[in-house]
Image (spheres, rainbow, N blue to C red):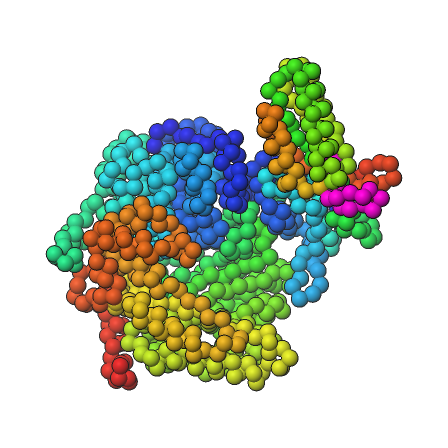
Amino acid sequence: MGEIKRLDFKLLEELLEGVEKPGRYINKEIGTKSKDPLLQESIKGMVFMALVFPDIYEVGMSNLGLQILYDIVNRNKDFSVERVFSPWVDFEEKLRASRVKIFSLENRIFLDCFDLIGFSVQHEMLYTNVLNILDLGGMDIHSGQRGDDLPLVAAGGSAVVNPQPLSKFMDFFVIGDGEEVIIDILKKVKAYKKNKKSKSWVLKELSRLDGVYVPRFYKFYYYRDGLIESIEPGEKVKKALVRKLDKFDVVTDPIIPNIKVVHNRFIVEIMRGCWRSCRFCQAGVIYRPVRKREVGPLIEQSVSGIKNTGYDEISFLSLSASDYGEIERLVEGVTGALRPGKISISMPSLRLNSFKLKFLQLIQSGRKTGLTFAPEAGTQKMRDIINKNINENEMLDCIRMAFSRGWEKVKLYFMIGLPFENDRDIRGIVELIEKIINIARSEIPSRKLGRLKINVSINAFCPKPFTPFQWVGIESPESLKRKFNYILSNSPKRFVKISWSDPERSQIECALSKGSELVCDVVEDAWKNGARFDNWSDFFDFGIWKGAFKNSGVDINLFTTREFPVDEILPWDVIDIRVKKSSLLKEYEKSKKYIQQNDKV
Amino acid sequence: MIRFKFYKRNELKYLSHLDIVGIITRALNRAGLNLAYSQGYNPRPRIIFSNPTPLGVESLAEYGDAYIEDDIREEDFKNRVNMKLRKEIQVVEARKAAGKIDSLMSQIDLVLYGFTLDTGSSGKTRKEELYREIVSSIKESDFSGSIFDIRGAVSEGASNIIFLKLFGYAKILKEKNNTIFKFNNFYNFLKALSGEEGIGLSDIKKEELFVIRGDSLKTPVEII
């Protein structure tokens, strides 16, 4: 908030000596738009913001939300935003050893010199990275300990729809769509800076905005067992909502990373929200209502984005691309305007059937990448319970057609530990794999059969806030391991590769998703004991987390295996996600009723 | 086909060869140049680059051969591409080639590296003595078989600087009985050597690539 200090390039060069992928820490990409504070006539009326993505550069730069907010803020003459990512462990070591604070990429401004720091948190397992970055910025991690001379610190993104586990560290949270509220926030911060007001003044002002949750204005009262007795005040914070996506054009001149990132392509959001209502899916609820972009402008802006960036691949992003009504027209419009055969299109959420397969063949311009299916469960009963409307026969027909047309690679996603699941459902997963191999044997010529690859990914179901299954407890690691071992030992060995998520990590993910503010101390303790990059399996250390719960005196089962009674006050009840709790409950009841009528557990 | 020469400097010296390939390819796309594509299962744009420059080393002599479907003037190519690149990477020269040309990698015989050595002393005799010592240590080292020539210049007056120019072999030449110059190994050697003498090492650059033609050295652009 005081003087803007920056890291000298010579010093950066010394720090980069011997560091893995130094391209992560330099700037100079095409498409950066931050304003250099040294080149401004006066910075008094300006707000400088750091947009922090608490994962490495390659992951952060593949995130569309980051590019959208970056663009919106930097278009405004009074505001400038610069990017900060988590340093990889080798660079963190260098920074700490040389006592150099973490800095932004564009103008290498030290983090504590910004007016506002906004974290974009896309995954609960990145909470420790958030604390680490604050600490690397030379700041106290606790909101209450940071004085008026230090930046305001906020967090947004899908992993803070339940803000409680980070509530001690943040001055405020942003819940919902960021496009509009970010400018409203920056305007208030501008007034705060200009009129030299106090932090409590600006937080009071900010709390009037839809989507802004300020933890210090809420008080939680607890029973002795750690459950919430009441929350004051009772008023909820309403999710920020952008009613029309078309109000903001597609970012057609995004930052183009210099180094290879996770997604090296031009990304366009075609639709936000999803009609499908799968009962385990958090995105399906928190991004409601469904909003789509108009196909005409979408084609135009997609084409201009490809030309501006020089990418040879475009990705149409949505939670369910097949539900975008004019998907064929969109694809034809974009490919038709560009050189034939030189652009490939990817659609991460395309629900495949025989019809869509022909379509896929067309858009991949002859290349046959793997086909992905997400049946999620092995039996129709289970798919009905989770409301995953995928028909097994339709899926198998599509796979049959794919094999006969030369595809050789299939990827399948399943979850285990779903509510009301029994051993028959687990066996169903094995049987489905067997069925696919039998189809392959009949469709793929035997000389080519050796190339068949079936990759099966198995994840432990983790109940999430604001879903119909938010009350459900996660299954114990022991039970999950038994089920996984059953699948592993009973599935065909040839052609099949099975991967699965660590069930202990899923317990921690669950506790961080559903935790109350009691979990803040756990996150802090885990971070102090070295937890970093917990979303990376090489780094996740269950021992640290188990210790952290013990040291903080918090029973992990309170937020994991325990089923929440439906009348319990939930930590995320302070947020109004614009979907009624009663309708979530109704969905939950439906799945229970299904069991009573169709199956004996 | 257009052969072009470009540099990568300052921050962008921290990018790998593959990163540079991506940056140049996208810049050509953005410039609206229609790159020809390779045939086959997974068609790729046809641009071929010269030997990778080590990460962290500035280069004034990166070369690329781009196959473009439309006819374009050399100056236009340079200007249009440079508009789409940052100032840390810029094309300095472009020349069209008619007919079939051997690949860049197979043509290049020598790589010229430049080093700046800070001796900490401005005495002319001392500087010259240090220069002779360093050159003779290099000539006696395992690297001698991979070095075509070393030249140097001792700065005049109050400066402490020695410039060292080193021509390393980029490939095995039958008549020379040489080995290939390995930059990273040599750099570690030179760092240790100069460290012993209390000399600072800076401003390391790849300066030019050469093809041996009879008694003279030609740049890759000169031979097409």
Q: Residue at x 20, y 53 (%)?
A: A553
**For residue A230, above or below residue B158:** below
Residue at left 28%, top 47%? A524
Confirm whether residue A327 shows in the render.
Answer: yes
Res A27 visible: no
Q: Which residues are magenta?
A: B166-180
Q: Nearer the viewer, residue A120 or A40?
A: A120
Q: Position of residue A530 (x, y in %)?
A: 35, 47
Is B128 above or below relative to B70?
A: above
Number of marks in the image?
A: 0
Where's residue A111, x and y in %?
Answer: 39, 37
Residue shown at 25% from the left, 37% from the top: A145
| Quadrant holding the C terminus of chain A | bottom left
Quadrant in the picture for the N terminus of chain A:
top left
Query: Can you say whether A378 is above or below A543 in the image?
Result: below
In this rendering, position of residue A532 left or right of residue A313: left
A273 with respect to B65 (left or right): left
User: Is-magenta flag for residue A252?
Assistant: no
Which sits in the foreground, A292 or B162?
Answer: B162
x, y percent for residue A209: 27, 48
The residue sitting at 52% across, 45% down in the picture is A20
In the image, is residue B169 part of the stretch drawn in magenta? yes
Q: Position of residue A496 (x, y in %)?
A: 50, 74
Q: Is A347 on the left or on the right of A481, as rendered?
A: right
Front one among A564 and B144:
B144
Q: Residue B31 vs residue A441: left or right?
A: right
In the image as oriented, which residue stretches furthest toward the right? Answer: B214
